[in-house]
Amino acid sequence: MPERLGPSLSKPLFERIALIGLGLIGSSIARAARHLNLAGTIVAVDRSEEVVARVRELRIADEATTDLVAGVKDADLVILCVPVGVCGAVAEAMRPGLKPGCIVSDVGSVKASVIAQVQPHLPQDVHFVPAHPVAGTEHSGPDAGFATLFHNRWCILTPPDGADEQAIERVRVFWSAIGSNVEIMSAQHHDLVLAITSHVPHLIAYNIVGTAADLETVTQSEVIKFSAGGFRDFTRIAASDPTMWRDIFLHNKEAVLEMLGRLNEDIALLARAIRWGEGDKLFDLFTRTRAIRRGIISSGQETPEPDFGRRREDKA
Ligand code: NAP
């Protein structure tokens, strides 16, 4: 059992949980839930036979199936861990199997769109408590998951108006037991905050790595050889799952476009400062941004080690 995970519970929080989509996030929840005894029975549901077979091999769930309706049957908690763009279709397909009174949640990186997609398909007596664990890596699939992924990371709940208080509390307790710090906010506010803290940075990374790949005056081998100068860290982010990120941008369109507009204005100001030799403007900005990085480290969300904690032998 990983060192940083808390003690396992003497009694499970839920009798039966069903996880839909056993990729990085779904399989990490399964592993954490199993280590911590958060569920009497963990059911893994994935559309892919290969993923289901791998989940059985890894023994990270008690049952594994490709049958969505059978998989959610009798579950007290169902968590959608699929790409944002298919949440509505999955909710519609699983509806006949949902137990009255059960809680449906998700882990999508965008919240308003997921609520709009999922809620219309849920029966009145099913409680919907959307969630977004703000934790991840650039890897995908059931082998990529690990039980401590959410430890000391934030999990944001965005319950729609009128959501059942008891259901919200049960989901809050679930994520706290996994080791996350839980915060509750509106879906709209979540989408705006994540647009600037996660979505736009990913877009910048995809863009800069794409631009470098298209350059005629710098060769591919030079890009790889001299990547330590900041570029390498963009390539890690730009290696993130294409399906997941395509869906995030299409489903958080307004907030991302608003933040991109601001970013474009600020980049124009930076270009002007460089052109006119306004070093004080550059210095002031870089001083403020350094303080933000120090704030992230002191809040425990990043390692203080130089070069992102890379081992010496990894360094270029
Ligand atoms: P992932 O590793 O690619 O896993 C997604 C899983 O869902 C795959 O097994 C996939 O199967 C399955 N799936 C896709 N469409 C499906 C469908 N229609 N029905 C049933 N299963 C389906 O992705 P992930 O990183 O775990 O991301 C899952 C969710 O978590 C996304 O909504 C994402 O926004 C959110 N999230 C991700 C991160 C992160 O850093 N990765 C962080 C926080 C939240 P196939 O392989 O057959 O497509």
Image: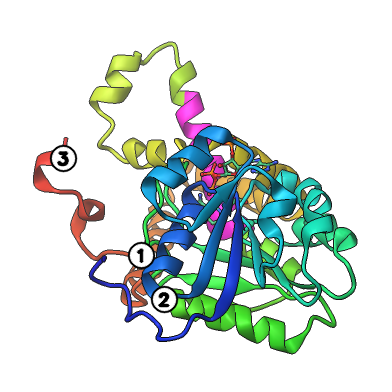
Q: CA distance from mark 2 to mark 1?
A: 8 Å
Residue neighbourhood size for the residue with mark 3, other residues' Cα within 10 Å, grouped as few (<14), some (14–19), many (≥20)? few
**Which residues lie in the magenta part?**
195-211
Q: CA distance from mark 3 to mark 2?
A: 31 Å
Q: Which numbered dot is residue 179?
A: 2
Q: Which numbered dot is residue 315?
A: 3
Q: Which numbered dot is residue 148?
A: 1
Residue 232 falls in image quadrant: top left
Evaluate whether residue 245 shows in this view: no
- Amino acid at circle 2: Gly
- Amino acid at circle 1: Thr
**Which residue in the rendered view is the most extreme toward the left?**
313
Residue at the image position 39 percent from the left and 35 percent from the top: 235
Which of marks 1 and 2 precedes in the sequence? Answer: 1
State yes or no: Cβ of the residue under disc 3 lies below 8 Å from any atom of ligand 1. no
Q: CA distance from mark 3 to mark 1?
A: 26 Å
